[in-house]
């Protein structure tokens, strides 16, 4: 397999995390009650944006001569790790608040990774990577604050004395 540069590795990681996030929104949507339509809609928008992010990442990966396969392989690995984390965190007992707690961690992780890619690219100065960061980072920051707000809304409805 072709060796990846640090920049390519970071590109692979955000690609894999976007794919994992898209799957996570699906899983959490499944934990919602039928009347939580606004939250379901927010999750669907997040999923669309995660899929679009993944698509753009793959496009940038595809422009790297001879590296596309290695980047996508590494992205698939990251996606698998994200999925394993999700499977550990959420089980049959989980409710929608647990789901949003997971998303709070996952989206914060995505924001962190995008900032790391941006930082590594400060030296590499690749315009295609910069364009990708400019597209994805504001979206990820919005996802992070959205899932945190939804988590707090759900927490506010919880009965603290319930056993
Ligand atoms: Fe996200």
Image: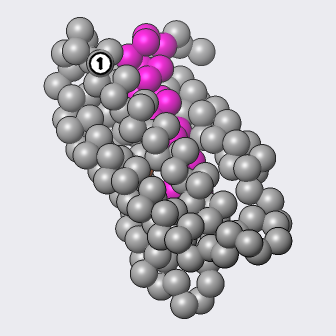
Q: Nearer the viewer, residue 153 or 27?
A: 153
Place of residue 89 in the rendered image (x, y in percent of width and height, measured from the top left): 73, 50
Q: Nearer the viewer, residue 28 or 132?
A: 28
Place of residue 41 in the rendered image (x, y in percent of width and height, measured from the top left): 42, 77
Q: Main secondary structure of the magenta part?
A: helix
Q: Nearer the viewer, residue 136 or 161?
A: 161
Left or right, residue 8 beside residue 156: left
Q: Is residue 28 above or below residue 51?
A: below
Instruction: Tell me which segment is drawn in magenta.
Output: 4-26
- Asked if the magenta segment contains residue 19, the reply would be yes
| Residue pictured at 51% horizontal, 50% vertical | 104
| Residue pictured at 47% horizontal, 46% vertical | 107
Q: Nearer the viewer, residue 87 or 105?
A: 105
| Residue pictured at 43% horizontal, 11% vertical | 5
- Could you say whether the residue bearing mark 1 is in a helix, strand or loop? helix
Q: Is residue 46 above or below residue 19?
A: below
Q: Quadrant of residue 10?
A: top left
Q: Is residue 70 above or below residue 22?
A: above
Left or right, residue 43 beside residue 84: left
- Residue that carries the numbered disc 1 in the rendered image: 119
| Residue pictured at 51% horizontal, 62% vertical | 151
Place of residue 161 in the rendered image (x, y in percent of width and height, measured from the top left): 74, 72
Picture quarter with the N terminus: top right
Q: Please tell me how crowded label 1 is: few (under 14), some (14-19), or many (20+) other residues with Cα within 10 Å.
A: few
**Residue 23 shows in this picture:** no
Place of residue 147 in the rendered image (x, y in percent of width and height, measured from the top left): 45, 59
């Amino acid at each position: 397999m072709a060796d990846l540069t640090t920049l390519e590795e970071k590109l692979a990681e955000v690609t894999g995390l976007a794919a994992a996030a898209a799957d996570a929104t699906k899983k959490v949507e499944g934990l919602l009650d039928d009347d939580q339509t606004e939250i379901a809609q927010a999750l669907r928008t997040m999923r669309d944006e995660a899929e679009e992010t993944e698509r753009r990442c793959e496009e940038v990966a595809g422009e790297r001569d001879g590296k596309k396969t290695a980047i996508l392989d590494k992205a698939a690995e990251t996606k698998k790790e994200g999925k394993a984390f999700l499977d550990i965190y959420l089980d049959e007992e989980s409710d929608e608040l647990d789901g949003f707690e997971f998303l709070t961690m996952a989206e914060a992780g995505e924001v962190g990774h995008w900032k790391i890619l941006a930082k590594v690219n400060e030296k590499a100065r690749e315009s295609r990577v910069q364009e990708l960061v400019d597209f994805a980072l504001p979206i990820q920051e919005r996802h992070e604050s959205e899932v945190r707000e939804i988590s707090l809304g759900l927490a506010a409805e919880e009965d603290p004395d319930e056993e």
